[in-house]
Amino acid sequence: MSDRIGCARCDYGFPHVASPPGHPIDATIDWSEAMNAFMYRLSVIHRRIDEEIRRELKRRVPDSIRLLRLKKLRLAVKDRLAGHVRRPSAA
């Protein structure tokens, strides 16, 4: 599950390792815009998963395994969103 969420992190230019102080990447990345884009992407993923859950529930015989996986993925995305929302206020 976290691999799918981690892909969204790669799409917006987040470095996988911390860059040393004064590294040129720090000057080129506006971290507030990157975080907003990252949070937006997570909210889009959450909405799409929610739509898939609704679509599966409308089927005559919903696949319980698929529903379970979708709900776990949705919860993982929601936890990531909540974690990013709480960080700035704690700092």
Image: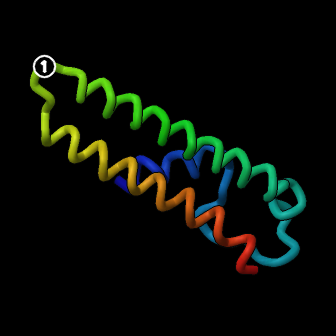
From this view, report whether residue 42 is shown above or below residue 75: above
Horizontal placement of 72 versus 80: left or right? left
Could you tell me which secondary element the residue under label 1 belongs to? loop
Tell me how the rendering is colored: rainbow
- Of residues 76 and 13, the one drawn nearer to the viewer in this rendering: 76
From this view, report whether residue 13 is shown above or below residue 79: above
Horizontal placement of 88 versus 16: left or right? right
Q: Residues within 10 Å of mark 1 (few under 14, many from 20)?
A: few
Check disc 1 and give the amino acid type: Arg
Q: In the figure, residue 83 lies in which quadrant?
A: bottom right
From this view, report whether residue 61 is shown above or below residue 9: above
Q: Where is residue 5 in the image (x, y as percent from the top left)?
A: 46, 50
Q: Position of residue 74 (x, y in %)?
A: 39, 48
Q: Where is residue 43 in the image (x, y as percent from the top left)?
A: 57, 43
Q: In the figure, residue 88 lies in which quadrant?
A: bottom right
Residue lying at the far top of the rendered structure? 60
Residue lying at the far left of the rendered structure? 61
Horizontal placement of 58 versus 44: left or right? left
Q: Residue at x 62, y 63 (%)?
A: 84
Identify the residue under disc 1. 60
Q: Which residue is drawn at 39% across and 54% down?
A: 75
